[in-house]
Structures are given as C-alpha cells and as structure tokens.
Amino acid sequence: MSQVVTYERQGQVGVISVNYPPVNALSHAVRSGLQDALKKGESDNDARVLLLVCEGRTFVAGADIREFGKPMQEPGLPDVIGKFESSTKTIVAAIHGTALGGGLELALGCDYRVALNSAKVGLPEVKLGLLPGAGGTQRLPRLTGAAKALEMITTGDFVDAVQAREYGIVDAVENGGDVKAVGLAYAEKVLGESKPKRPVRSLTDKVEADKNSSAFDEARAALRKRSPNLFAPFKCVDAVEAAFKLPFDEGMQRERELFMACMESPQRGGLVHAFFAEREVSKVPGLDKNTPVRDVNKVGIIGAGTMGGGIAMNFANVGIPVRLLEVKQEAIDRGLAVIRRNYENSAKKGRITTAQVEERMALIQPTLSYDDFADVDLVIEAVFEDMGIKKQIFGTLDKVCKPGAILASNTSTLDIDEIAESTSRPQDVVGMHFFSPANVMKLLENVRGAKTADDVKATVMTLAKRIKKVGVMVGNCHGFVGNRMLHQRGAEAVSLVNEGASPQQVDKVLTDLGYPMGQFAMSDLAGLDVGYRIRQERRKAGENIPESWTDKLAEQNRLGQKTQAGIYRYEEGSRKPIPDPEVDALIAQYRQEQGIESRAISDQEILERCMYVMINEGAKILEEGIATRSLEIDVIWIYGYGFPAYRGGPMFWADQVGLGEILARVKEFHKKTGGKQWEPSALLERLVAEGKKFGDL
Ligand code: T1G
C-alpha cells in the first residue's frame, strides 16, 4: 500500500501530508504514519515550522469507524495528538472539506489552524453514540468556552469556517481551493511573525471564566427534554464539565473513562450500524454501480394533495422544475397554498430565506392538462390508493409522455407490475414511495417492478440522493417492505386492544422503546380513512378482512388529527393525543358484540406481539427477496417510521434480543392463535438452527 502519511520539506516548512481515501480516517496506518512523519519533521533541522495537511476531498473526517469494536492497536489517537501538542516545533494545520471528530481533535493538537472558506468542522461523535475521545472535550472548551463547546459536542452539528473562526476554533479563514498552498503561506506567516508554540492545553482564560457556569446543568436539563433515552449526550456534558473542574491531564483521564463507557454502550453499536447501513443501501446488490442514469431535469407530479405537494417540494428544494397537475383548479389552488405555507413556516424558523420561498414556488408550475407532461423526464403519480384510477392515469401517461420518460407511482401498497401492465413501456415504470410528510421524512422506497429497466433503477436511486432522501431499492409485494411490516404491527396492536389493552397503553410501550409516536397516534396522524380505504379495497378484492373498531371510528368520521378526533381527541390547534372515554366506550361495545372477554395485558406481551410479528414478517421479506439485506429493513424503519437509530433498526435490535428467544415466542403465538402472521419464517428457523443472526446474512 502506498504510504498513507508522507513527510517532505518545502523551504523552511516541514509538510506532513495524509493521503488515505476516501476521507483520511484515522486508521492504525494513519496514526502510525503521523507519528513517524512527526519524528522526521522534528529531526529535520531545516524545518523551522511544520504543516499538517490532507490530500483528497477532505481533512481527516474522524477515527476509522470500521475499527470500532476491534482491539485498539497502538499508537492510540490521544497519544499521537499529545505528541503533536508537545512537539518541539510549532505546527500549523490547514483544513479543507470536513474536519470532524478525531480529525478536528488532531487539528486542536496543533498550535494554529487555518481553514478554507468552504471548510466545516465538527465533533459528531455523539451521533455514533460516542463522545470526542481524543481530547476534544478538553481542548475545544479551552478555545470556545463552555456554552459553544457543549452545543457542538452534544449536538454533533458542524460549523462552517467563518463561525469556527468566530468561536476561536480556527485562527484564519482563506479563500482559494489549494489547501496546501494556503497552509504553506500561513506557516510562513507564523514563521515570519515569530508566533510562539501555543498548545491548546495551556490556554486558561476560558476555563477560568466558565468554571462555575450553570451551562452544564442547563445542558443536562435540555437533554432530558430533547433526548431522554440517549446515553452519550449526557456523558458529553460530564466530559466537558471535567475540563472546567480538573487539571488537563486528569480531565483527559476522565474523558477516557466516559468514552469507554459510551463505546461499551449498546447504543453505540446501534448508531454505528445505522451509519454504515444508510450508506450501504445506496449500493444495490445485482445492479452494476456503473449503470448509466437518465437525465432528470423536469418532473411532472399528479396530485396536489398532502403527498403530491410534499413530493413537489423535494424537487423544488434542489432546483428541479415541477409541473403539478390536478383535475380541478380549486385543488391546485389549495395544494399550492399548502406548499407556500410550508415554505413560509420554514422561512419564519430561519431555515430558508423569503427569496428562496419565492424561488421555490416559481419552480412549481400548476397545470390542469396532461399535455404539459410531454417534455418531463419523470412523472410521479400521487393520487388515491385506487388501482382503477392509477391504471387509467398510467394509460394516459403512456400516450402523452416522451419515450424514455420514467413513470413512477407513489403508491404505498399497490402492485407496481399491475400498474406497469397498463402501459406499453413497463420497463420505464417504477414505484417511488415517499413517506408522509413527504417534504420531511427522509426515506424513499424505490420499488422495482418485474420489468423495470436497470437504468431506471439506477436513476431513481441516484435521484434519491439528489433530493436528499435515503433511497432503498425494494421488491414488489403488497406494502413492499415498510408498510407490509407496519400492517402486521397495526393488526397486532388492534388485536391487543380488542383483547383488553387500551390504545394509550399500546402506544406507550412503543414510545418507551424509542419510537417518536405509537401505532395509534400515528394512525391518527396519517388519517384513519387511509387504512379504512385500503381495507375496503382488499375487501372488494375478496379478502376476508373482519370489521374492526377502527372501521367504526372511520365511519363516524372520526378520522384522526384532521377531524380533531380519531382514536384520540385533539384540542383546537394541538397535535397532542388525548385519550377519549367515547372511544373506550366504543371499544367496550365492540368487545361485547364480538363476545370478547377483555383481560389485563402486560407491557411485555404488547412489546413482543408488536415487535416480533414485525421481525417475523421482516424475515419473510428477506426470504422472498423483497429486501436483499436486513440492513435495508433497518434503514427503512429508522428513516420511514422513526425507529430509534440507537437501537440500529428492528432487525439489528432482534439480533440483540436473540433470534432464539424471538422464534420461541413466535411459535407460542402461532400455537395460540393459528394466525398466518405467526407462522414462523423459515429463514428465522434456519438462522436459529445455525446459531446465526440477521447481520450474518
Ligand atoms: N470511518 C470510516 N469510514 C468513513 C468514515 C469514518 N469516520 N466517514 C466516512 N466514511 C466512509 C463512508 O462509509 C463511505 O464509504 C465514504 O467514507 C464516503 O462517506 C476519537 C472516536 C465525512 C461528512 O462521525 O459524516 O472520530 O460507502 O458517503 O456524504 O473522538 O462520511 O464509499 O465505502 O458519508 O460526502 C467521527 C462520519 C468518527 C464522520 C462525508 N467522524 N462521516 O460525507 O460521504 S468517531 C464522523 C461523515 C471519532 C474520536 C472519535 C461523512 C462525511 P463507502 P459518505 P459524504
């Protein structure tokens, strides 16, 4: 392997250069290379100042996450950074791209830091269930003070170069694209001005000023509100506080102890799994990564309702013009008004400017005529979940759209192949299933039909990244992956209420697990009419779907938040679900009519029945090849339904619970109910028999 860290002298500057694609992560080779290059620089008598710089796309973006969980090989990063800080020579770090985590910590071990204008810095370890474990919690506060350090370290948010200079993290910001030239010039300047070594550990003014600050307890109180279930953020506060209470070396020791506690936490395992899984899903097994993609410069969207409007926003947000089609002018006007209101709310929160509101609105052109779809590269249909309507629409699209236009449906459950058969170009038909609210939820389930062309698959997967979504390629079946599992959880939740649990008890078990909202609160958000219509469709198609108490609510026009009453009731202007005695009475009445003797149900039974039915369904989805890897299911549930990333996703969580335990309970529920949903998955049985996990697939 070519040297990942080199040393060369340019004039009076000894240049230490890291070159370890893709992001110069601090692998063992890089840490050793840095140590060796530093020794060369220190022994090079003609090098009067040293410069640390990186090749490629970015300055060091952190420790090598792929090494986590493996035995750490010396030299450890804190030691390497300590050698830079105590070096006999003054060291300048030149930053470009994203100096993150251990990368920023390495730069803080240098005496001066210069950054390109386009650079960003951050300590995002908390997003991996960790804390900065190489001095970041001790050095950053010595430059920024308590409040900024706490904010950066407990959120993991990046700051841009100018902000970093304002906070005292970098000393200078320079325009220009050649970070090495900028670094050399700054090193010469340091030399010319005889700037002394300035180890960050020796800075005391910020520590003195904030040592009795209330910022630490305020940060803890804020975290108890924002993320009570998370472990690492609270340890971050403890570590930063140590910088103000202990001498530097003891503070470093404290940081180490807290870092190891985070490293051993199951939350770190879940978050690191989620980090890599999110990146893995963009590599579709069986789809050549060099498959050409089709141009998408103009998009047509059919339906200006909640979904269509939200989908349109995703494209306008990244500058792609949209033709938004409806059948009636008032529907268009209503849809555009909702879009404008959403943008104006974002502007009020400072997320976008008022100019951007107008720019984006101008990109969304309404139309009542399919003729305006003649030149679009992609159409996304987002109308009612009614197969008859969809087939009619795709028949029309087949006639009006140009050859090569991609015809996508945002259907959340219906058969993509059946839709494709209503056109003469099934190879151009694909599912693009957005999640409500479509302009917010990051997940995009791209559904391949039997005849969907490879370049269409590659195009929609690339497009997902372009519109800042996490795209997952899935197979075609009722409900695809996410909703197929959600359907099972929903049915089990309804059964649990039939048998004696209350909706709020079921929801609390799920929110205690870490979901942002429970099954029934989510049904009220989506609208009970959505599920009701799907069940009616399936009854029309001849399936035996027994009437449930939720049908009765829908028939009483208790549709959820949109009617201020559904499974819960909602006060004017509030989204807070309030248990409703009227619903309790309706459920009791339903039990009586069904001859059900209600019983007390434990939280544990609720957890097992809601989660294990999903795991069993997920295993069947893998068996059928609807998903090819369990990590795809994890990503779908984290980004589509808010499954807690710190638990890694449902299949990762199942591996932690133990597949043997899960299979045993699945068999018990199957024996007790005979329900098809409890028929043990053959894959689950095989994995247990072989002592394997989903993660081993
Ligand atoms: N280690 C190993 N691989 C990494 C990596 C890392 N830190 N960061 C990225 N990669 C890989 C990634 O898997 C992908 O691989 C490729 O690089 C491009 O990434 C002691 C302990 C830097 C903003 O948390 O936020 O330091 O798929 O697709 O969208 O205190 O990657 O190509 O094979 O995301 O342009 C702290 C994590 C670590 C930064 C670039 N650092 N990375 O985003 O590309 S913990 C982080 C990112 C730590 C110390 C502690 C992003 C990025 P492949 P990408 P991108």
Image (spheres, helix red, strand yellow):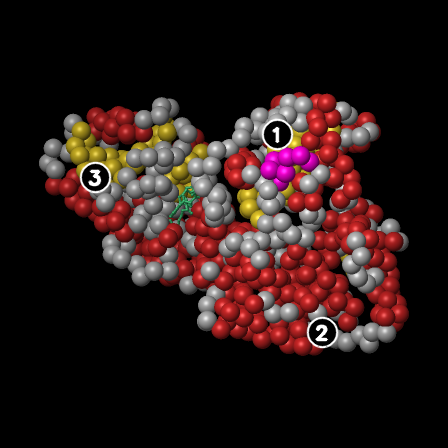
Task: Name the element at disc 2.
Answer: helix
Q: Residue at x 58, y 53 (%)?
A: 626
Near-viewer residue (310 or 400): 400
In the displayed structure, would residue 272 be above or below residue 142? below
Give the quarter of the image for residue 354: top right
Considering the numbered disc 1 on the image, is that residue within a helix, a strand or a loop?
A: loop
Amino acid at dot 3: Thr
Q: Dot 1 corresponds to which residue?
A: 405
Asked whether the residues under the numbered discs 3 and 2 touch, taking CB atoms below 8 Å apart as contact, a structural biologist would say no
| Residue 596 in the image, given as x and y percentages of width and height | 83, 74
Question: Ligand 1, what quadrant?
Answer: top left
Residue type at mark 1: give it: Ala
Apparent side of residue 369 relative to residue 181 in the rendered image (left or right): right
Query: Disc 3 or disc 2, which is closer to the eye?
Result: 2
Pick whichever of labels 1 and 2 is earlier in the sequence: 1
Describe residue 524's horizontal placement relative to residue 122 as left or right: right
Query: In this rendering, which labeled residue sits more in front, label 3 or label 1?
Result: 1
Q: Disc 2 designates what residue?
A: 673
> Residue 158, percent across and down?
46, 40
Ligand 1 under 8 Å from disc 1 Cβ: no
Q: Residue at x 71, y 38 (%)?
A: 422
Q: Residues within 10 Å of mark 2 (few under 14, many from 20)?
A: few
Identify the residue at horizontal 22%, vertical 42% (top origin): 2
Q: Quadrant of residue 505?
A: bottom right
Please give the residue where the numbered disc 3 appears in the rendered image.
6
Q: Amino acid at mark 2?
A: Thr
Residue 426 seen from this side? yes
Which stretch did the figure color magenta?
423-430
